[in-house]
Amino acid sequence: MGRVRHAVLGGTFDHLHVGHEALLATAFRVGRSVSIGLTTEAYLAEHPKPFPRELEPYRRRRANLERWLRSHYPARRWRLVPLENRFGRSVEDGVDALVVSADTVAGGRAVNAERRRLGRSRLPLVVVPVALADDLEPVSSRRIRAGTIDAQGRRRAPLEIRVAVELGADLPAIVAALAAAFPAPRVRAARSPRVSSRARTTARARHLAESAIDGADLGIGVARAARGSGAVAVRSAGVGLPARRFPPGGAGALEGTLLALVRPDLGRKVFVRPPTSRQRWRRTSG
């Protein structure tokens, strides 16, 4: 999907966090101009949020958002508009794309249904994957208000991590990577189940990570292949990251690969869903 004239998005933007930043960055990548609907206190009174006492007032949310926009996109065209209802200006003429997160796609579909009812064209939905916190759970304002994570997705309490490996000599490299990635993680070795050596290295790593997760925030599994290469997998109770291979090269290869897996610094992926009957996903690099 190429750049469109005008992209819109909306939300509460409470305790502005990395997930919000991904949405905003995508909107500016997609649209030459951007409109952002910001839920008002009247709207939130009718649609209450968890931990309401920690919810920032409208003025503070608006000021924080304006500060971020001026800092990151000083030369771009944007406007903030109060969002008094679920649709705001997304159902008006002059809108070319709607940016939503992966967990608010239903809201985007509702916008298109309303636009169709009003006799207007449907909008392409630009769907941004949710940002994951240290524990692989989504970064959300609710979790920030609850005191579980900060705005960068860092867990406030130390992570409980269990590790299952095929080669005990890999443990120091794993501990080093986790210490660099997380503040004061609690790392323990888990009993490694027997896995058929005929299985692929990535499949064995995933199985080891699944076996290690019991009673922990994260489970990590490392499997070794011939000639010193291997694979590492990370999962939480609900999310499993794709297993990643690492080349021969001593402890540094494993340590670097695991660190990149739990602390990715690459661009995010953006999924664009055109309003067609086939409902296909097309991936573009972020």
Image: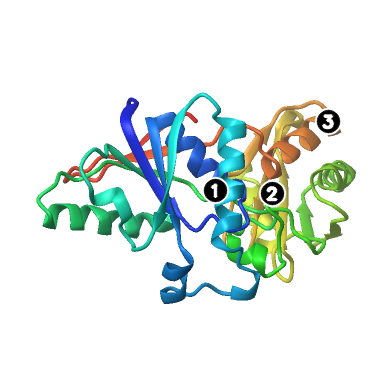
Question: Mark 2 belongs to which amino acid?
Answer: Gln
What's the colour scheme? rainbow
Could you say where residue 152 lies in the image, as x and y percent from the top left?
69, 49
Judge left or right: residue 70 versus residue 249.
left
Q: Residue at x 23, y 47 (%)?
A: 92
Q: Closer to the observer: label 1 or label 3?
A: 1
Give the number of marks: 3
Instruction: Locate the N terminus by quadrant.
Output: top left
Instruction: Please report the residue visible at 15 percent of the width from the left and 44 percent of the height from the top.
Output: 121
In the image, which disc is placed on residue 146?
Answer: none
Seen at 72% across and 67% down, the residue is 147
What residue is disc 3 on?
252
Which residue is at the far front?
59
- Helix, strand, or loop for circle 3? helix
Residue type for callout 3: Gly
Indicate which disc residue 20 carries: 1
Q: Which residue is mark 2?
A: 152
- The image position of residue 252, as x and y in percent, is 83, 30
